[in-house]
Amino acid sequence: TGGVYTVVDSEAPVKPSDESVRRIIREFLVDIDVAQNTVVVKTGPGHASTVSQALDDAGWPEAIGTIAGENTVFIAVRSEKDGKKLERRIRELL
């Protein structure tokens, strides 16, 4: 404004409710599998980014981070044990 840059206040990110994550998982998840320290989630076409964002925002301690494609989400975990734990957690939401 007036030729000067200003920082726009942003809203703090809101952690999604468990019900919101559950709804997204139930609606878009097609399959899930664990490959050592990677959990692979299959979704319908075009829904991987929605699932990935929901999982990142959930802040579950087993998940280090996610990468989404068109219909696949790769979730990095620290160990195979964490992978199995995360798989169980996601399956319980179905």
Image: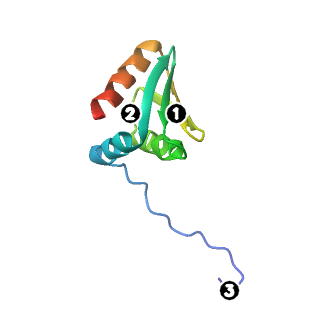
Work out whether mark 2 precedes mark 1 in sequence or the reverse, and give the earlier one.
2
Distance from Cα at disc 3 to Cα at disc 1: 41 Å
Residue at the right extreme, as displayed: 3
Distance from Cα at disc 2 to Cα at disc 3: 44 Å
Q: Amino acid at mark 3?
A: Gly
Distance from Cα at disc 2 to Cα at disc 1: 10 Å
Residue 57, position as x, y percentages in the image: 43, 44
**Residue bearing the label numbered 3:** 2
Q: Amino acid at mark 2?
A: Trp
The quarter of the picture where residue 2 lies is bottom right
Which secondary structure lies at badge 3? loop
**Residue bearing the label numbered 1:** 65
**Residue bearing the label numbered 2:** 60
Mark nearest the camera among 3 and 1 is 1
Please tell me which residue is depicted at 41% across the width and 13% down the height of the picture.
81
Work out whether mark 3 precedes mark 1 in sequence or the reverse, and give the earlier one.
3
Which secondary structure lies at badge 2? loop
The residue nearer to you, when weighing 12 against 89, is: 89
From the image, which quarter does the C terminus lie in? top left
Please tell me which residue is depicted at 55% across the width and 34% down the height of the picture.
72
Number of other residues with Cα within 10 Å of mark 3, as a class: few under 14, some 14 to 19, many 20 or more: few
Residue 58, position as x, y percentages in the image: 38, 41
Number of other residues with Cα within 10 Å of mark 1, as a class: few under 14, some 14 to 19, many 20 or more: some
Above or below for 80 versus 2 = above
Please tell me which residue is depicted at 46% across the width and 21% down the height of the picture.
33
Q: Is residue 32 left or right of residue 89?
A: right
Q: Amino acid at mark 1?
A: Gly
Residue 76, position as x, y percentages in the image: 53, 26
